[in-house]
Amino acid sequence: MPKRLYARSLLIVITPMILLQSVVTLVFMERHWQTVTQRLSTATTRDLAAIIDMIETYPADDDYANVIRIAQERLSMKIDILPPDPLPPPGRKPFFSILDQILSAEITRRINRPFWIDTVGDSDVLEVRIQLDDKVLRAFIRRSLAYASNTHIFLVWMVGTSLVLLMIAIPFLRNQIKPILKLAEAAESFGKGRPMPPDFRPRGAEEVRRAGFAFIQMRERIERQIEQRTAMLTGVSHDLRTILTRFKLQLALSGSKRDVGALNRDIDDMQSMLEGYLEFARGEAAEDPGRFDLAAYFDKLAQEAKLHGRTLATTLTGDPTIHVRPNAFSRLLANVIGNSLRYAMNVKVEAIHTRGSLTVIVDDDGPGIPASSREDVFKPFVRLDEARNLDASGTGLGLAIARDVARSHGGDITLDDSPMGGLRAIVRVPA
């Protein structure tokens, strides 16, 4: 079956029409051909029988000129009286021939003499030879006198009318499919974090319009929920950061340096966690899509890696410019590539931008992550001390933020073994 709704809808329209026409053709037309051909062949056989009776009733004193004239003028047949030579051998028969069967049966039943017929040689004329006592009657008969030859008119009208109906139905069907395609395009844009198409509005059949209005309401509810969650996280983090600043001020004014150092370290940890919360909140905040230059960003990362004593090799295939949310996507690459630069000495980044898709592969020679724990690292606040030596500033939100950004663009991030001996991170997003 076709995969697309338009093709399936066309099949729903065309298939019953073809089946109906096939049944009508096989049942009605077969009966029509059978009945009409039977009657025409019977009449033709009666005419031949009448000619034979005239030949045998009136002797051949004038070479049967009157019989030949009557047959031609009154019966529309051209006849000849031939010497009593043997009849030709039976010729080949058509695969499907109602005329051969019915006409042969009628001649056998009504005349009951040796005969020979040819329905193949000339498409418009039948040749019939009948063995008489001392002669052979040869008759040339128009096919239309013995066979229903005008049935093609019915077929032409039936097929022509069907084509006209299809030419009318196909544009109407295409207009009914367009609103569904627009709704799918709007849903896909929302899944990629892009704004709704400017020309989208619910239209079409009532069910399609209801689905369009339901999608718009769902999108508005999700956006309000994200805004509320972002505002809540931002507000809580801001309030707690204010309290931490107040703690630092009070500790700076206190006299015990030994207690101040320990408390300052705890406050720094809490400050780092709050910065992670704020970054996570900003990752869900709304941002308009724009152009992002991969080549410039890779050059910037290479310079930062060089400053920290790391080796970063980058390759780019395809157009370096992609259409994403720039700040969010920059945060995604920073978290993934920065994670490799933190725990490995050599990192290789390969970006492949094909039509409609971007794949970024990050390989490193670090300690890696066990296969059983690779999904856990995408959970917020998860830290794998056995996998990598995380420093004190880590909050366990880096990869969670990266996957959240990738999925908001309609893509995802997966982890695998790297040929360099460490970890491979694969980022796939539509672009």
Image (cartoon, helix red, strand yellow):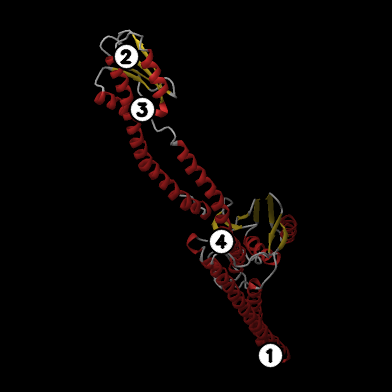
C-alpha gap between disc 3 and disc 1: 114 Å
List the residue tagged with mark 2.
Answer: 89
List the residue tagged with mark 1.
Answer: 256
C-alpha gap between disc 1 and disc 4: 71 Å
| Label at residue 180 | 4
List the residue tagged with mark 3.
Answer: 95
Mark 3 secondary-structure assignment: loop
Which residue type carries mark 2? Pro
User: Quick one: label 3 or label 1, which is nearer the N terminus?
Assistant: 3
Residue occupying image coordinates x 60% and y 55%? 365
Which residue type carries mark 1? Ser
User: Quick one: label 2 or label 3, which is nearer the N terminus?
Assistant: 2
User: Quick one: label 2 or label 1, which is nearer the N terminus?
Assistant: 2
Q: Work out which quarter of the rendered image holds the C terminus and state it.
A: bottom right
Residue occupying image coordinates x 32% and y 9%? 60
| Residue 81 coordinates in the image, percent (x, y) | 35, 12
